[in-house]
Every structure is written in C-alpha cells, then in structure tokens.
Amino acid sequence: MLKQELVPNVHLFKIDAPSVARKAQPGQFVVIRIDERGERIPLTVADWDREEGSITIVVMEVGTTTHRLAQLGTGDSIADFVGPLGLPTHIDKFGTVCCVAGGFAMAVIMPIARAMKEKGNGVISIMGARNKDLIFWEDELRRVSDGLIVTTDDGSYGRKGLVTEPLKELLESGTRIDRVIAIGPTVMMKYSSFTTQPFGVKTIVSLNPIMVDGTGMCGCCRVEVGGETKFACVDGPDFDGHQVDWDLLSARQRIYLDEEKQSFEQWQREQAAAP
Amino acid sequence: MAKLDLNRVPMPRQDPKARGKNFNEVALGYSPEQALAEANRCIQCKKRNCVEGCPVEVDIPDFIKALREGDMPEAVRILKSKNALPGVCGRVCPQETQCESVCSLNKMGAPIAIGRLERYVADWERRNKGGENPKPTPPPPTGKKVAVVGSGPAGLTAAADLARAGHSVTIFEALHVAGGVLMYGIPEFRLPKEIVRSEADFVTSLGVELKLDQVVGRIATIDELLADGYQAVFLGTGAGLPMFLNIPGENLNGVYSANEFLTRVNLMKAYLFPEYDTPVKLGRRVAVIGGGNVAMDSARCALRLGAEKVYILYRRSEAEMPARHEEVENAQEEGIDFRLLTNPKRFIGNEQNCLVSIECYQMELGEPDDSGRRRPIVKEGSEFTIDVDVAVVALGTTPNPLIAGTTKGLETKGRGTVVADEETGRTVKDKVWAGGDIVTGAATVISAMGAGKRAAADIDRYLTG
C-alpha cells in the first residue's frame, strides 16, 4: 500500500488490488480486515487505477479499526480487501447534477462527479467541512465540476455555514437541478434530503450502516426505505434520500457505542503500554 | 457366530453445567479403548446398507475393520478416499437418519456409532500428522481448468474429487477463510474451527488453488470465468440469505438474524471481544426464534456468552422440530427454556430503538400442511409478552441472489434456488453445475457433500469424455 495523510486524521491509502480495480465503479465499496483479530469494515472507494491495479480509499480515524489502519504506512499490507461490493451509483445523462459532499466524503463523491461529467451532465459540486484544515481534493473536484462551492462550519475557508445552505439557495434560484447526490455523515445526508424534498428533486444518498460480511449474508445493515426493509450492502448503498427512515439508520448505527468505546480504550491502553 | 453386542459405547461429553460457560467442544471423542469396543460390535454385513445410506458412499465396514485391526493409517486412507471432510462429518452429520438408520443392528436399537468412529479416525490422523500415509500420488494432469464457487461442504468436496481426477481446480471464496457455513455458522463447541481449517488444508494439499475474498458475481461473473479459460464451473454458494419474520419491530437494535449472530460469534470470534475487535450484544435475556439446528446453535452460543436466561420460541411442538434430537437434548441439558407452540407477533422497543420484549401468540396444531407436519394456528386472544434484550431469528436461509442475478441463462425457482439435475448437478446453463444448499435450500452438510461429489463425477465425465 501507499499511504498519505490528506488532512489531520484523514488518510489516503492506495491499495494494490488489481482484480478489484478492474471492476470498481463509482459508489461501490470494499470490505477490509486488517489482521486475524480485526473486524470487517466497509469503505467506499475513492478512486481506482485499472492499469496500475490499485484502489484508493480515504479513511478518517474514528474507532479502533481506523486508528489501527492509520498506524500502517507505505509498503505495509492488510489481511483482507474484498470488493467491489454493492451496486454502483446510477450514472446517466440526467441534465444537471448537484454533488454534495460532507466531511471526508469529498473523496468518494469525486469519482461520481467525474462519471456524471463524462456522461455529459452539468455538474455543480458543493463540499463542506468543519474548518479549512479539513478540506482536501478541492482542485480535483473543481476539475470535474462546472461549478464548485466550498463551505466551512467556522467560516475559515469558503462560505461560512453548512452544505445545505448553498444547496437550498441553488434550488431556490431556479437553477435547473435534475438530480442531487449527497454523501457524508448521516445527519448531513438527512438534512440534504430534507432540503431538496420540497423542490421534488430526486436525491440519492449513500448509506453507511454497520456491516459484517458486506455480501448480503447477515442483514446487519438493514435499513428501511419507502417502508420496506433493505440490505444496504446488496440493495444499496445508494438509496432515494426522500424515502429513507433516517431515525432508524441513526439508531442502528449506535448499536455498539459501548463496545466501540470499550474496544478503543483497550487499544489506547495497549498503545500506552507499547515500548 | 459371536453373540451380538448391543451396548453402544456412549460418547463422553463435557458436564452440562461447565460447558454452558465455555466454547470448548461438548463431545469429547472416544478413547482408543472405547473406539475399539465400538468397532468390535460391527458384524461386517455382506450387504452393505450403511454404505448406501451414506451420501458420499464411504466404505464404512472397511474403515471399521481397519480400525479394529489396529491399522489406523489404512482406516484413514479408506475414509478419506471418499470423504475429504471426515472430522467435520463425524461431528455434524445426522447419522441417525443416514448410515446408522440402515445399520443391521438398528433393528435391535443399537446401531454402530459410525459417526463417532469416523470422528475417532479423523482425529487420530490430525493428532498424528497424517500418520504413516504417504501423500497420494498426484494423478496425471488433464490440463482442464475448473472453477468452484464457494468453499463450503459442497465446494470443498467437489474440488477434492476434481483435483484427484487430475483437473486444475480453483476455489473462489467470498469470505476471508475457507469452509463456508462450517466456519461462520456452526459454533466452535460443536465443530472446532481448527478441524475445518485442517480439512480445508487437506483439500488444498491435493493441488486445489484457494482464492479467498473473491465475491463471484462482483469481482467476476460466471461468464467471465468461462471466458477466462475455465472449462466448467461448479456453484456451491449455499443458502446465505437470512429469512426474517416480517413483523413489526424486527429492525430494533438487539434483533439479529441467526446468520449475523453466529457470524459475529464464530467467524469473527466476538466471544473473545475485546481481544478480537468484533463485538456482539451480550443479552441478559435472549430469545431464539426457530426449531432447527441453527436455532439450537444460536441459543447455546447466547448461553455461553453469559445470558441469564435463554428461550427457544418455536411455533409447533417438539415432535415437529427439525433440529437433530441430539442437539435438542444438549440444549435442554444446558438449561435452554423451550417455549413451544409460541410465535412472535411483534418486537417491542424502547425510545433508543432497543429491543425490550416480544409479544407472542400461543399456537395450536391443526391439520398437516405441505411439509407433512401439523400446521400451527394462532389461538386468538392468547397474546403474552416475554422480556428479552436480544432476539435471534433462526427461520432458515435462502440462496444469495447475487450469482443468479448476475448470470444469464441460469434458471431459478421458489425462494431463489438454482435448478440443477439431482443426479448430475447440471444446470440449464452450458458448462455450469450446482449443488448443495444453492439447489436444495438450507439442508445438511452431508447432502451438500453428496451433491458436490455427484457433480464432480459428472464434470469429470464431461471434461474427459
């Protein structure tokens, strides 16, 4: 693997995985496991190079697995890298597509924006982060967009505020938007969907429930969309944001909060004890 | 002729109290003396009903004869020439409905404990690192390439037989270890994972290439495998899609499919959390819904994870339970509380979306249904609630639709099973065979192995004919 810290606590990994790279499409994910004791976690692919045979993933340090991953460096390897999984994002000529990314999802929105652009759509991108230091791939996203709006929560860069504000203004301005793709933290996708709903603009979100196998075997990633139970790993991860039961998703993401804390504290103790 | 000995040697087992608190194997296996005593009871019938009763046609009287003559390497050779997974089969096959049910001594109620002897021979070999058996000489290579999709019982069996016929075999496995349901489904205390690993290693030692982390249908379609130089494809992807009750509250936190619960516990080793990273909710009070072996496994796992109370909720009566009698007995001994003629109406949660109780109906039995078992009927007005914080839904599984959905020209029927000839495993698609749970829906390890074996024979005929 090749590793690079993009912004504090957010790392890019370029993983040598030719067979996955040959097949990867925008919106798909991989499941990784660091070693024998590790858990399986899903990560959406940020990019791929079919010739070089590599997949790029971008990871934010949150819990035990992502912190352990962040300790690895160029030349290291991980036990398992499975993919590409899930259905690709539906790419078609829609007209004008607005790609909205919150936080480190600016990495995974990039190949979607690029594919939408290549398909002949007008692409307007909005990317938001807490502050200036957390912005990355701005130029990359600008290159595949006809317009790019950057927001920060604290106003340290671009517009001050949340991504939903320029999204709302855009819709109100009468600019024709045929489809919105919103990817980021659950709450950001939820409010992006709420923002677009009154305008009746189809809004696709990429859901991120807890998964185990990622192949449709366990049902851990159950979500409710339009009143029906779906498995995000095989029926998604993309769904119509106006149909998603957001409260259920948020609640199910919290199932293991206690265990995640316990696991992380144990990892921190191990780190402190290590020479 | 010597007098018939009808004293079947019992299997030594861990004490029920102690074993409810650990994940060590429950059945401890025969000692050499016990194995010999049991083997000596075999009357070596001329008409070998037991062999016919075995889906993979193990030469049962012959391996028993070798065992009692003290020639263990020969017993191993006989067993493994037909069955690549004897340590697995000796533990999880329902011998009571197969080889042992047709044993001549079964008429007197004391069939030879064939499964226990099979396990004894397999365990002897593992302890003695292959014994004195030289590696079987590899057959001349045929130059034909076969892809086997899935490394569960069907796939491993088909791969072993195809490799022994000289074909170049590659197994594509979606998970990070070989074994399929033997690894993610059946718990350590019933089938130690070390045994699965060692028997999968035996299959690769025959020259089979094992590719892990390969989700066929995504990383390559069946047609791409065929275009890539594989002359035949065997589908042994099992029945991996869990069924749910489709009642209110089923997506509450704390409601698991048995697949998820068992995968976390067995495959990901959540019982060793936080030493291993994958957690599982440790219920204080747990209800498992279903009456099959998977339900028994889930209940007994929950108990071992430290639950104070574990229920089995089953909508029919004990007579209709599909689980092996032995497993029901094990669960009862360990203190699992069987609530029969009980069916959930809805799951009830709190404000945090966490399960707190299950509202159930009392059921009664009506006329037999299509399965021949008496149909359970709701007793109106019989609702009552059971307080639980974890529920495991063990209603069965259906094939994962991924393969059928990405392969043109495969025929499927009810619940997504792939249509294949029972004798040959041929599907309606040229060059594609299938066997095991993907064809039958969830069934037994040994029936999947039998299907793998028959398909391998037919693939061999096709490739060499």
Image (spheres, grey):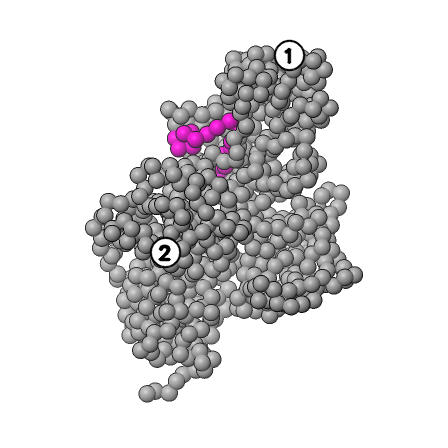
Residue B460 position, x and y percent, is: 29, 52
Q: Secondary structure at mark 2?
A: loop
User: Given contact means CB atoms under 8 Å apart, are the residues at marks 2 and 1 in contact?
Assistant: no
Please name the amino acid that badge 2 sits on.
Thr
Q: Which residues are magenta?
A: A14-34
- Alpha carbon separation for disc pair 2 and 1: 67 Å
Pointer 1 indicates a residue of which chain?
A
Residue at (43, 31) in percent of width and height: A23
The vertical placement of A251 against A202, above or below, is below
Query: In this figure, which residue is indicated by the disc labeled 2?
Result: B424
The answer to whether residue B17 is seen in the rendering is no
Residue at (58, 17) in percent of width and height: A95
Residue B48 position, x and y percent, is: 34, 74
> Around disc 1, counting alpha carbons within 10 Å, would you say few (fewer than 14), some (14 to 19), or many (20 or more)?
some
The vertical placement of A228 against A155, above or below, is below
**Location of residue B332 by image quarter:** bottom right
Instruction: Name the residue at the right extreme.
Output: B381
Please name the amino acid that badge 1 sits on.
Gly
The vertical placement of B143 against B290, above or below, is above
